[in-house]
């Protein structure tokens, strides 16, 4: 037998259902949507990737979102403790709580490089901010960006930044500092307050810049590129990266939604909430595509530019766009806002673990993990200059040529997230007490049956295939 906790073992909590939804959407929407998704869609040839990605989100991602929120809501404490409680109430081994620990470790590692990449965004926000100030000073606030700079100069900025250790460190430090500051303030006055202020701002900017892109850019080419599938481009490697991206973008496999779910006090239906998160996250990724590619196509740039798409191609494109200085600045502020509401969720996972499992104070726990991730991040950023020859997993063909940041990104994304997702689906699909799941999630009988098919059968099988083929591409 079990009881849905109404009183709580953690005193912290969201002040309302919409606060949780905003915070969870804030966690999901981040660099993954605005930097990684357009990059991958561009590299993978567009339409077929996008359609397969959407399938992954709703068939695999959404059931997992609901499962993680369920564990947190039922457990009411950090990820490890919450899984342990669900296991105990279901009379199964508490060793399942290991995947909460794997998740917390993955979140900690992702945070270390996430902050470095967000640091690049911060730098570009600074570049465009300075440009905008100059434009205003010249009495022409709506001029295009970076007047008088050659394409080589604009694109060279990224190389200059990567060679400048002090600057990289300063940006990484500022971003991690902001993340730590918010998390240390707590769930209500830190995370919830940040999400409540930043997410509405994010959506206004997103819609505004997308409309701008549609007006000044090339929307026809973009729609054809994003939504016309060429199925021959859907190779196993592309499917693999689409699933990995779906997990990353929905913040799955790192126990993030278990942790956020543990601060839910009410008993409103969780199914609708989970669907809202998945729809919002996917909508933002698609809007980001509709925001970025029209500008890229309008100037005749290559949509398959890769990771530099946002940092080199776009700044150059803004040079020939009306109001490019202003829009460029707003664009990087938009990414920054999205990144902060995600990085705080990454730091919150290990922080909650320290509080719940080690009995630390919030400030101590957040500081230990924030500073720890900052230090690991330093290695990531040195990988672009001083440590450029270091390939941490060089013995492993899959990761052989990767620099430090890409290694941490690749290992967490290709190994830890799918593993976390696999264990989550097995645990909730097969081990958790079914009546408890149905009661806590509030699903109708029909929806419950559908969800159970997806989580117990489709998820484990699909994620295993993708995990194995991802790790051992040679078997294909
Ligand atoms: N979902 C976030 C993004 O798209 C990244 C993230 C992953 C955040 C895992 C939390 C946990 O940027």
Image (cartoon, rainbow, N blue to C red):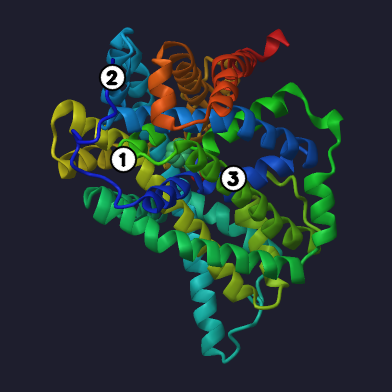
Q: Which residue is mark 2?
A: 2
Spatial CA span between label 3 and label 2: 32 Å
Residue 147 percent coordinates (x, y): 65, 77
Residue at left offset 69%, top offset 11%: 474
- Residue extending farthest to the bottom is 139
Verify CB contact (< 8 Å) between mark 1 and mark 2: no
Residue at left offset 34%, top offset 33%: 73
Q: Is residue 1 left or right of residue 341?
A: left
Q: In terms of secondary structure, where does tag 2 sit?
A: loop
Which label was assigned to residue 348? 1
Q: Quadrant of residue 72?
A: top left
Residue at left offset 77%, top offset 25%: 235
Residue 305 percent coordinates (x, y): 71, 47
Residue 408 percent coordinates (x, y): 46, 30
Residue at left offset 47%, top offset 67%: 126
Classed neighbour count for the residue bearing mark 1: other residues with Cα under 10 Å, few (<14), some (14–19), many (≥20): many
Task: Please report whichever mark, 3 or 1, sits nearer to the chain's N-terminal start.
Answer: 3
Q: Is mark 1 within 8 Å of ligand 1?
A: no
Q: Which residue is mark 3?
A: 279
Q: Is mark 2 within 8 Å of ligand 1?
A: no
Q: As displayed, is residue 393 above or below residue 292?
A: above
Q: Is residue 85 left or right of residue 136?
A: left
Classed neighbour count for the residue bearing mark 3: other residues with Cα under 10 Å, few (<14), some (14–19), many (≥20): some
Observer able to see residue 373: no
Q: In terms of secondary structure, where does tag 3 sit?
A: helix
Classed neighbour count for the residue bearing mark 2: other residues with Cα under 10 Å, few (<14), some (14–19), many (≥20): few
Spatial CA span between label 1 and label 2: 27 Å
For the residue pair 7 and 363, the one nearer the viewer reads as 7
């Amino acid at each position: 037998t079990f009881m849905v906790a109404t009183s709580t073992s953690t005193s912290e909590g969201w002040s309302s259902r919409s606060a949780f939804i905003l915070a969870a959407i804030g966690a999901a929407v981040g660099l993954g949507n605005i930097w990684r998704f357009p990059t991958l869609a561009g590299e993978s040839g567009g339409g077929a990737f996008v359609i397969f990605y959407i399938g992954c989100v709703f068939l695999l991602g959404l059931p997992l979102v609901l499962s993680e929120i369920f564990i947190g809501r039922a457990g009411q404490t950090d990820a490890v403790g919450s899984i342990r409680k669900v296991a105990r109430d279901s009379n199964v081994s508490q060793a399942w709580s290991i995947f909460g620990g794997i998740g917390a470790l993955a979140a900690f590692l992702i945070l270390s490089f996430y902050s470095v990449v967000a640091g690049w965004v911060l730098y570009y926000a600074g570049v465009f901010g300075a440009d905008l100030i100059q434009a205003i000073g010249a009495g022409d606030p709506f001029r295009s960006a970076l007047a008088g700079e050659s394409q080589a100069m604009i694109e060279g900025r990224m190389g200059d930044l990567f060679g400048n250790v002090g600057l990289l460190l300063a940006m990484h430090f500022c971003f991690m500092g902001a993340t730590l500051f918010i998390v240390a303030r707590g769930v209500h006055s830190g995370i919830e307050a940040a999400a409540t202020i930043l997410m509405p701002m994010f959506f206004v900017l997103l819609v505004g810049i997308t409309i701008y892109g549609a007006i000044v850019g090339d929307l026809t080419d973009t729609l054809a590129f994003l939504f016309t599938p060429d199925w021959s481009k859907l190779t196993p490697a592309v499917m693999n990266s689409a699933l990995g991206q779906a997990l990353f973008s929905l913040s799955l496999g790192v126990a993030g939604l278990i942790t956020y779910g543990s601060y839910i006090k009410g008993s409103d239906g969780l199914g609708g909430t989970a669907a809202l998160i998945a729809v919002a996250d996917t909508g933002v990724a698609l809007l980001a595509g509709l925001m970025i590619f029209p500008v890229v196509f309008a100037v005749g740039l290559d949509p398959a530019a890769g990771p530099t798409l946002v940092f080199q191609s776009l700044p150059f494109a803004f040079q020939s766009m009306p109001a490019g200085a202003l829009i460029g600045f707003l664009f990087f502020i938009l990414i920054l806002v999205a990144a902060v509401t995600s990085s705080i969720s990454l730091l919150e996972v290990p922080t909650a673990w320290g509080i719940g499992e080690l009995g630390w104070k919030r400030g101590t726990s957040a500081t230990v993990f924030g500073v720890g991730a900052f230090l690991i991040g330093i290695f990531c950023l040195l990988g672009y200059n001083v440590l450029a020859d270091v390939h941490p997993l060089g013995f492993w063909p899959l990761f052989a040529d990767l620099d430090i940041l890409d290694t941490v990104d690749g290992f967490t994304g290709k190994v830890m997230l799918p593993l976390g997702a696999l264990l989550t689906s097995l645990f909730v699909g097969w081990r958790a007490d079914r009546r408890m799941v149905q009661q806590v999630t509030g699903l109708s009988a029909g929806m419950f049956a559908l969800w159970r098919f997806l989580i117990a059968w489709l998820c484990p099988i699909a994620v295993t295939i993708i995990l194995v083929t991802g790790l051992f591409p040679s078997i294909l």
